[in-house]
Amino acid sequence: MPSLLELQNQIATCKRCPRLRTHCEQVAREKRPQYASDSYFGKPVAGFGDPDAWLWIIGLAPAAHGANRTGRVFTGDKSGEWLYRELFEFGFSNAVASVSALDGLFLKGAYVSCMVRCAPPANKPTRDEILNCRSYLETEAMQLENKKVILSLGAIASRATQEVLRSEKPLQKFKHAHTVQTNSIHQVMSYHPSQQNTFTGVLTREMFQEVFKLCLSLKNS
């Protein structure tokens, strides 16, 4: 079983999904105009955070001009602004925002990763691409030995989390702020802080804060 550091190196060189690799590299070459002077990462993005974390946060995939640009999960896009703001507010982060992999931000008690490690076209990975990344999520599940709560962002990540935990219970349908317990691990489901959800009010800041409060309440239960 590779360590988290070894896993990060494996992920950065992964070529399991040709469609995703082609897309990420194309985005990194063409860039978005406001980031024209940036050097895009353009590779699969590993997890980030505290190896001793009790809270594990799982999103869908890197954003094409977010983590695919910066090299750090949930960094450099609007979804990341929402997530890292609450991580700071609830004491997991030393900074309110994450703008690059070299900005000095670090996490304490939390680890963040995605179920798919490459930015997919239209933010829609195929089922095969999700399965190709499954072993990385499983390795993280093994290495994050102190995890007590998993916060799954979005319906697809919520399903993948249940599959990785290998619960004998039937898979639970996605419901915001719903909790599923597998052995000693609590999984909390939340709407993803994507612009599609936050701009339309599907997910408000108050709702997102309540989810973090729920995670804290489950830590020692």
Image (cartoon, rainbow, N blue to C red):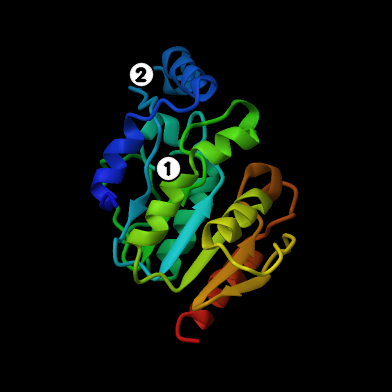
Which element type, helix, strand or loop, lies under badge 2? loop
- Name above or below for residue 136 compared with residue 15: below
Label 1 neighbour load within 10 Å: few <14, some 14-19, many 20+: many
- Give the residue type that dot 1 points to: Thr
Residue drawn at x 35%, y 37% is 11
In the depicted view, which residue is nearer to us: 135 or 113?
135
Apparent side of residue 158 relative to residue 143 in the rendered image (left or right): right
Residue occupying the far bottom of the picture: 221
Residue drawn at x 41%, y 25% is 15
Residue occupying the far front of the picture: 168
Work out how far the residue at label 2 is from the one at label 1, CA to CA, in angstroms. Answer: 17 Å
- Name above or below for residue 37 compared with residue 143: above
Residue 203, quarter of picture: bottom right
- Give the residue type that dot 2 points to: Ser
In the depicted view, which residue is nearer to us: 208 or 162?
162
**Residue 32, image x and y in percent?**
50, 20
Residue drawn at x 54%, y 49% is 59
Contact, CB < 8 Å: mark 2 with mark 1?
Answer: no
Apparent side of residue 212 relative to residue 144 in the rendered image (left or right): right
If you read the primary sequence from the N terminus, does the residue marked by circle 2 or circle 1 appear first?
Answer: 2
Residue 75, quarter of picture: top left
Which element type, helix, strand or loop, lies under badge 1? loop
Residue drawn at x 64%, y 52% is 154
Q: So how many labels did they put on this image?
A: 2
Nearer the camera: disc 2 or disc 1 = 1
**Residue 92, image x and y in percent?**
37, 66
Q: Which residue is mark 2?
A: 37
**Residue 96, image x and y in percent?**
40, 57
Q: Which mark is residue 45?
A: none
Label 2 neighbour load within 10 Å: few <14, some 14-19, many 20+: few
**Residue 48, image x and y in percent?**
35, 50
Q: Which residue is mark 1?
A: 75
